[in-house]
Amino acid sequence: MKKLIILRHAKSSWKNLELADFERPLNKRGKRDAPRMGRLLREENIVPDLIISSSAKRARLTAEIVAEESGYENEIIYSRDLYAAWTDAFIYALNNLESDYECVMVVGHNPGLEELIEVLTDEVESMPTAAVALVELPIENWDELDDDITGELVEIWRPKELN
């Protein structure tokens, strides 16, 4: 059984309209929510063994903040392939992991993350910015993961629903 943590990047800034979408940073709410979600992961004792993130600035910053606040101490892998990605890109990235990783976090963007949850669990869930979903997958090795695997959506946390 593998665990997949799915994290949507925190709220990004639209202040500088000349910035490319890929380069947008976090806004004030994003800088508040990302640490909260990292602390939540630490409190729930679901710190990942590995984090793989879109290389877009808002995703990178979210991944770094959540990693620090959760107690994650390993390297974060950044991938341009996860920017505006759909399910197949996430599955491909996960398929190439060593089986040693029991719990992996992916950090990315909508609508791809909502699609990933639906494909992997048959459940439709909204993933607002900084939302975290925990999915348990009935696989022993990451290379077994495909879009025919049905996992269980264990929990979903959205910043606005937290105390």
Image: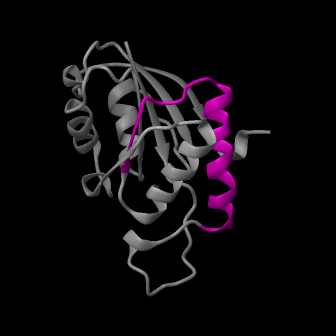
Residue that protrudes farthest toward the bottom in the picture: 18
| Residue 158 in view | no
Label total for image: 0
Q: Measuring 65% from the left and 48% from the top, which residue is drawn there? A: 35
Q: In the rendered structure, does residue 137 fall within the stretch colored magenta?
A: no
| Rendering colour mode | one colour
Region rendered in magenta = 27-53
- In the image, residue 31 sits, relative to residue 36, either above or below, namely below
Residue 32's spot in the image, x, y percent?
70, 56
Residue 112, image x, y percentages: 35, 48
Give whichever of 113, 20 is nearer the camera: 20
Q: Position of residue 84 (x, y in %)?
A: 32, 57
Residue ID at (47%, 30%): 48
Instruction: Give the side of residue 52 with respect to residue 69, left or right.
Output: left
Considering every residue shown, the one lying at the far right of the view is 163
Residue in front for this viewpoint, 61 or 81: 61
Is residue 118 rendered to the left or right of residue 24?
left
Q: In the rendered view, would you say 160 is above or below 139? A: below
- Which residue does the image show at 56% across and 50% down from the upper left? 128
Q: Residue at x 58, y 45 (%)?
A: 68
Q: Position of residue 154 (x, y in %)?
A: 53, 21
Check the picture and name the quadrant holding the N terminus. Answer: top left
Q: In this view of the protein, which residue sits in the foreground, 41 or 87?
A: 41
Residue 33: say if magenta.
yes
Q: Quadrant of residue 136?
A: top left
- Considering only vertical position in the picture, is 129 above or below 135? below
Q: Is residue 36 visible?
A: yes
Position of the C terminus by quadrant: top right
